[in-house]
Image (cartoon, rainbow, N blue to C red):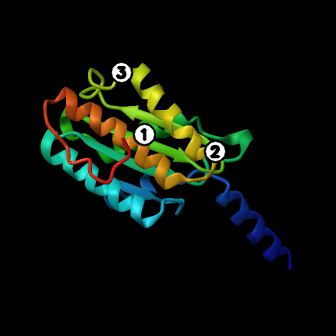
Amino acid sequence: MLRLVVLVAASLAYAADAPPVASLHATGFVNDFANVIDASSKQAIESLCSQLDRKTASQISVVTIQTLGDADRREPIDDYANKLYRAWGIGRKDSKGALLLLVISDRKSRLEVGYGLEPLLPDGFDGSVLREMRPFLAQTQYGPAVLSGVSLLAQRVAEKSNVTLDMSGQPQ
């Protein structure tokens, strides 16, 4: 009985930690480890990110996780996003990449932008993208929230790179 209690306590403690960066493996542009993005939004985001990558050599990756840990041992979202961005090599060697991280249970979001995209995506613009997502996030509509944010980022990068993206089916 004591072993069972210890095992349950240990599994609960582990479940409350952020997934180690090394354990997360990218499967595409959308990596929904929290299972909160609907299939149609995921498909639209993947399509848009793929098109952006082809036309501008810039990458946007989306990651959702459940938590960064319990309040008393929670890793700062900035640190976690930076580690994940670097571990995955988003934006290739030119660092023309951006990582949009949503932490569902903690109700946190972070946009990590590589050096190569910083001139195109300054901090003020990045903040406006996250603010545009808030109404969807408040209603737990994660797919539309991410699609909205990625659309704004992709449009901005494409415009500044003098290319046109097919935005049919994307929010305006």
Secondary structure beneath label 3: loop
The percent position of residue 97, horizontal first and vertical second, equals 28, 37
Quarter occupied by residue 26: bottom left
The percent position of residue 63, horizontal first and vertical second, equals 44, 50
The residue located at (30%, 24%) in the rendering is: 118
Q: Amino acid at mark 2?
A: Ala
> Of tags 3 and 2, which is closer to the observer?
2
**Which residue is situated farthest in the bottom direction here?**
1
The residue located at (26%, 43%) in the rendering is: 59
Picture disc at residue 83: 1
Picture disc at residue 138: 2
Q: CA distance from mark 3 to mark 2?
A: 25 Å
Q: Nearer the viewer, residue 118 or 163?
A: 163
Image vertical order of residue 133 relative to residue 10, above or below: above
Quarter of the image that includes the C terminus: top left
> Of tags 3 and 1, which is closer to the observer?
3
Q: Amino acid at mark 1?
A: Lys
Give the mark nearest the N terminus, 3 or 1: 1
Q: CA distance from mark 1 to mark 2?
A: 27 Å
Secondary structure beneath label 1: helix
Quarter occupied by residue 3: bottom right
Picture disc at residue 122: 3
Residue 35 lies left or right of residue 149; in this view the side is right
Residue 28 lies left or right of residue 16; in this view the side is left
**Which residue is situated farthest in the right direction here?**
1
Q: Amino acid at mark 3?
A: Pro
Image vertical order of residue 18 relative to residue 42, above or below: above
